[in-house]
């Protein structure tokens, strides 16, 4: 039973912190636009990767010879 004297105030402090964090997020505009970020992933990229850069990545280069001492 004595543990309740410790757990109840700790839970109230955590509840107060969670409430404060929610109010802070609302005031900062975190919940203003919930649809656009989900749709951004579906949009096509405006710039295309150059073909040369993609070919350089696809062709493995031979290893360099070891240094002769």
Image (cartoon, rainbow, N blue to C red):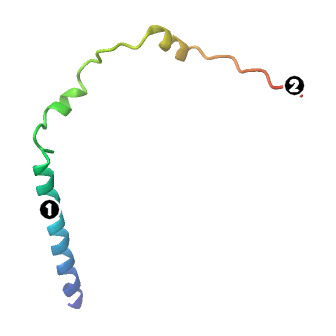
| Residue 41, quarter of picture | top left
What residue is shown with label 2?
68
Residue located at (53% from left, 17% from top): 57
Residue located at (19% from left, 87% from top): 5
What residue is shown with label 1?
20
| Residue 47, quarter of picture | top left
Left or right of 48 in this view: 69: right
Is the Cβ of the residue at disc 2 closer than 8 Å to that at disc 1? no
Where 25 sits versus 59, above or below?
below
Q: Position of residue 7 (x, y in %)?
A: 22, 80
Residue located at (19% from left, 32% from top): 38
Sequence-first tag of 2 and 1: 1
Q: CA distance from mark 2 to mark 1?
A: 67 Å
Indicate the quadrant containing the N terminus: top left, top right, bottom left or bottom right.
Answer: bottom left
Classify 10 Å Cα crowding around label 1: few (below 14), some (14-19), many (20 and above). few
Looking at this rendering, what residue extends furthest in the top direction? 51
Label 2: state its secondary structure.
loop
Indicate the quadrant containing the C terminus: top left, top right, bottom left or bottom right.
Answer: top right
Where 31 sits versus 61, above or below?
below
Q: Position of residue 50 (x, y in %)?
A: 43, 10
Looking at this rendering, what residue extends furthest in the right direction? 69
Where 49 sits versus 24, above or below?
above
Residue located at (23% from left, 84% from top): 6
Q: Position of residue 60 (x, y in %)?
A: 61, 17
């Amino acid at each position: 039973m004595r543990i309740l004297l410790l757990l109840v105030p700790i839970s109230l402090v955590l509840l107060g912190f969670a409430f404060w964090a929610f109010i802070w997020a609302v005031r900062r505009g975190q919940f203003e636009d919930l649809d656009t970020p989900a749709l951004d992933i579906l949009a096509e990229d405006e710039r295309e990767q150059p073909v040369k850069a993609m070919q350089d990545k696809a062709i493995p280069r031979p290893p360099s010879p070891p240094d002769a001492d």
